[in-house]
Image (cartoon, rainbow, N blue to C red):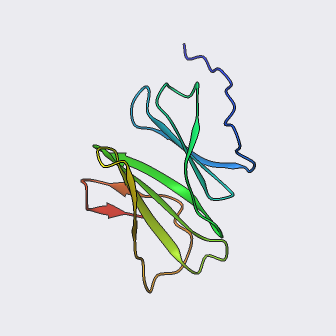
Amino acid sequence: MVSWVKHSIPNATRLTLNIHFSDNDRGWVTTQDGGIYSTLDGGVNWQQTWKVNGGAFGAIYSVGLRTWFGGSDYFGDSPWLVYYDRPKVKFTIVPMDGIGGFIRTVKFIDFQTGLW
């Protein structure tokens, strides 16, 4: 039987849009105000890892040591793909020129090949 324990995310002031765990300990949450939060202890403690102004991330997917986030500005005119490399501990923005809409789901079959 699965049991749930409620934990709060400090400083998260908006609705949670997505939650994803890449293993039992490492997890990510995106919020409506553009926040990306991470945990290394199964969700007991959370920290804000990144924040974008003027938009939000609705999609999260991990493959290997890379985690992808998809979203858009608040109007849905400029979609974003951002990835986080765990060994490098940095976020990288991938341009999505000429494509409109909010990215709600994203899946990757390897580090560079994905669908949304």
Q: Nearer the viewer, residue 110 or 90?
A: 90
Name the spot of residue 33 as percent of width and height, x first.
68, 58
Residue occupying image coordinates x 57% and y 39%: 47
Residue found at the far right of this picture: 13
Q: Point out the image quarter for the C terminus.
A: bottom left
Where residue 32 appears, as percent x and y from the top left, is: 68, 56
Image point 70% across, 45% down: which residue?
12
44, 101: nearer the viewer? 44
The x, y position of residue 26, in whole percent, is: 43, 33
Kindly identify the residue that appears in the image at 48 percent across and 62 percent down. 70
Occupied quadrant, residue 24: top left
Q: Is residue 89 above or below residue 6?
A: below
Q: Residue at x 51, y 73 (%)?
A: 79
**114 shown above or below 85:** below
Is 60 drawn above or below residue 76 in the view shown?
above
Q: Is residue 87 left or right of residue 43?
A: left
Q: Position of residue 94 (x, y in %)?
A: 38, 70
On-image quarter of the N terminus: top right
